[in-house]
Image (cartoon, rainbow, N blue to C red):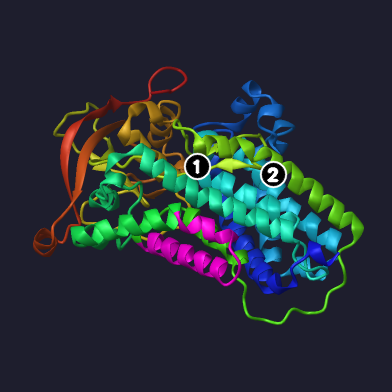
Amino acid sequence: MEWFTASEYWLSRLVFQRALAGLYLVAFLTAALQFRALIGERGMLPVPRFVERVPFRRSPSLFHRYYSDRFFAVCVWTGCAVSAALLAGLDSLLPLWGGMLLWLVPWALYLSVVNVGQTWYSFGWESLLLEVGFLAVFLGNDDVAPPVVVLFLLRWVLFRVEFGAGLIKMRGDACWRKLTCLDHHHETQPMPGPLSWFFHHLPKPLHRVEVAANHVTQLVVPFLLFAPQPVASAAAALMIVTQLWLVLSGNFAWLNWVTIVLALPVVAFPADPPPVSGAPLWYVVVVLAVSALLLGLSWQPVRNMLSRRQVMNRSFDPLHLVNTYGAFGTVSRIRYEVVVEGTADEAPRKDGDWREYEFKGKPGDPRRWPRQFAPYHLRLDWLMWFAALSPAYAGPWFGVLVERLLENDRDTLKLLRRSPFPADAPPRHIRARLFRYRYTTWRELRETGACWERTYVREFLPPTRLTGPDRRP
């Protein structure tokens, strides 16, 4: 069955698998360190409440059968351990079926997390990690050469990621067609990085070149992924370079990194393959059956890409096997931020002693320079960006966040960079105000040392305190 495998991609598979295991490790670590305050039993959107109203068939998860914070912690730390084992190459030491089962473990565990994660796990990179992770189960280990059909499906996913993102831009916002979106994007993106200020201040003609190059990379280059070598490798390399440029320009969790990882098996590395035995019949049957299923499910994202009403980041099945992707179909022209403050005053006054809570990633203090967090994902910081766009995004969880801050809840405070109140003296009142943020100019930066300038817009939440027997805001 020589037609079934492509031994020249053995090193591409190896690099891909180790890099994917590293991303799994980051994803599970993110879940382990943040889940209690977000979806835990006393979280802002508790898992037990979610599974009571959403049936298992709509969101398959281990946590439909049983949930406790301890059990969730065991699952995600197990995911960390298995991911680390895969990163170290344990799958290569097992028989083929054992390696496949080992790759199935992090996929099943992370699927269970995403399917109960609600708003906190509604981003496209969650589904992308799951779709790519599922394909990795069938890519084999050192016992067999990489299956051609799985390599093709990985290219098909990469094509949909890039081409879908390119189409949503051309359809979604006129600034992409006018090549002007980057006049605003670096300033208004969800979580700027340490270099975003400098990217924003690049000459506008260079911004036009960046947008034009992005259109070429996302609308033309993806078709070259299916060309013969070395053209396909060159196309993948160009995508990797583009994604690394995006890594430098902001914090986008592991979106850019998983796209880079997805491009790796396209590259034909110049290395002689080791001797391997032929693929067993059971493996061929399983791989072909799964591939036929995935190709059949692909009609939905294809129809979505061809539709004038194309949507971004949607799963078409509860297992996240085949999804549609896209990012920044529209670009905000103005940056708003919700600033959360507390006071120990018995009676809140506008000119009282209000102290600001500092978040880890989102802009707050104008003098504090953004840091690099990606591929680690600060979920609360991202949702705070959406809350600033519209209070409707914050409706389900913002009130609980305020309640936890009024209680000085330890798990919630771990999500923040700093609380202005000691652990034994929580604030009496919390308020939230909406500010407009803009990057300072070169001159303002030299004179003030601040990278942001902010202007008060309006009240987002009036002063609130715990009242009543249940002590809710």
Residue 32 place in picture, x, y as percent? 58, 50
For residue 206, above or below residue 288: below
Q: Which residue is mark 2?
A: 295
Amino acid carrying label 2: it is Leu
Front residue (pair 370, 412): 370
Could you tell me which secondary element the residue under label 2 belongs to? helix
Q: Majority secondary structure of the magenta segment? A: helix
Residue 91 place in picture, x, y as percent? 77, 65
Q: Which residue is mark 1?
A: 123
Which residue sits furthest front? Answer: 228
> Residue at left 35%, top 40%?
385
Q: Is residue 468 visible?
A: yes
Amino acid carrying label 1: it is Phe
> Residue at left 46%, top 53%?
253
The question of residue 237 being in magenta is answered with yes
For residue 460, above or below residue 73: above
Q: Kindly check if marks 1 and 2 are in contact, taking CB atoms under 8 A apart as contact.
A: no
User: How many residues crowd around disc 1 within 10 Å: few (fewer than 14), some, or many (20 or more)?
Assistant: some
3D distance between C-alphas at marks 1 and 2: 23 Å
> Residue at left 66%, top 28%?
58
